[in-house]
Structures are given as structure tokens and as C-alpha cells.
Image (cartoon, grey):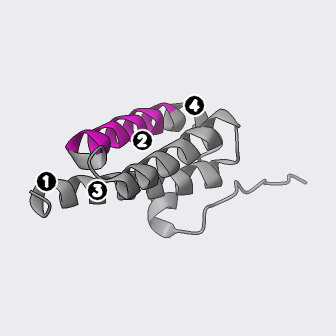
């Protein structure tokens, strides 16, 4: 009798389709997320985060939380969620600064 162990899923079909086996591919996914979170956070600060204190606080808090989850070797579910939230916040700040706060 063989026992098939099911890998833990995040619960969101889109994320599960992209990262179908997040624990096995952990180091590759973390490498991509480090580059994306770090670069987008820096671009968000560059485009106007230094002019608005609240925006800078939000960008730094979300980016540092995602990087802390990676450094703490948290479960991949937490790393993916925190990284995606950080990326969305960074993109929103970039769009707001470039198109609305000219």
C-alpha cells in the first residue's frame, strides 16, 4: 500500500497554477521574489516615496515584511502572500506617483 502525500496549496487557484509545488521549488521562487520585491520597492521610493512620508512608511513596511518572511524561512504560503501584497502596493505607488501626483 502506498501513501501519496499531497503538497500544501495556498487556496488561490491562480497562485497554485503558477507555483504548483511551492515547497519543492522554494529557492527558485524566493530568488525571483527577492528581485521583484526589492526592485519594485526601490522604484516606488524613487518615483515619489521620499516626498510623501505616509507613502514611504507604507512602502518600507510592506517591503521589509516580505523580506523578513523570506529571511525567517517562513512557510511558502506566507512568503507568497506577503510578497504579492508588497508588489501590488509598490506598483500602486508607482502608478499614482507617475500619473496622478505630477
CA distance separating discs 4 and 3? 28 Å
Which quadrant of the figure has residue 7? bottom right
Tag shown at residue 98: 1
Q: Quadrant of the C terminus?
A: bottom left
Q: Give the mark, 1 or 2, whose residue is nearer the N terminus.
A: 2
Name the residue tied to disc 2.
Answer: 37
Q: Give the mark, 4 or 3, whose residue is nearer the N terminus.
A: 4
Q: Give the mark, 4 or 2, whose residue is nearer the N terminus.
A: 4
Contact between marks 1 and 2 (CB within 8 A): the answer is: no
Q: Give the mark, 1 or 4, whose residue is nearer the N terminus.
A: 4
Contact between marks 1 and 4 (CB within 8 A): the answer is: no
Which quadrant of the figure has residue 41? top left
The structure residue drawn at horizontal position 13% and vertical position 53%, both measured from the top left corner, is 98
The structure residue drawn at horizontal position 91% and vertical position 54%, both measured from the top left corner, is 1
Regarding mark 4 in the picture, which secondary structure is present there?
Answer: helix
Name the residue tied to disc 4.
Answer: 27
Q: Nearer the viewer, residue 2 or 73?
A: 73
Amino acid at each position: 500500500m502506498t501513501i501519496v502525500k499531497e503538497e500544501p496549496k495556498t487556496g488561490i487557484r491562480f497562485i497554485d497554477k503558477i507555483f504548483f509545488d511551492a515547497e519543492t521549488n522554494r529557492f527558485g521562487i524566493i530568488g525571483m521574489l527577492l528581485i521583484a520585491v526589492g526592485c519594485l520597492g526601490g522604484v516606488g521610493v524613487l518615483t515619489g516615496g521620499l516626498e510623501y512620508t505616509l507613502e514611504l512608511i507604507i512602502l518600507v513596511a510592506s517591503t521589509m515584511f516580505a523580506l523578513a518572511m523570506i529571511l525567517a524561512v517562513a512557510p511558502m504560503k506566507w512568503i507568497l502572500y506577503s510578497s504579492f501584497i508588497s508588489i501590488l502596493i509598490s506598483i500602486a505607488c508607482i502608478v499614482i506617483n507617475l500619473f496622478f501626483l505630477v
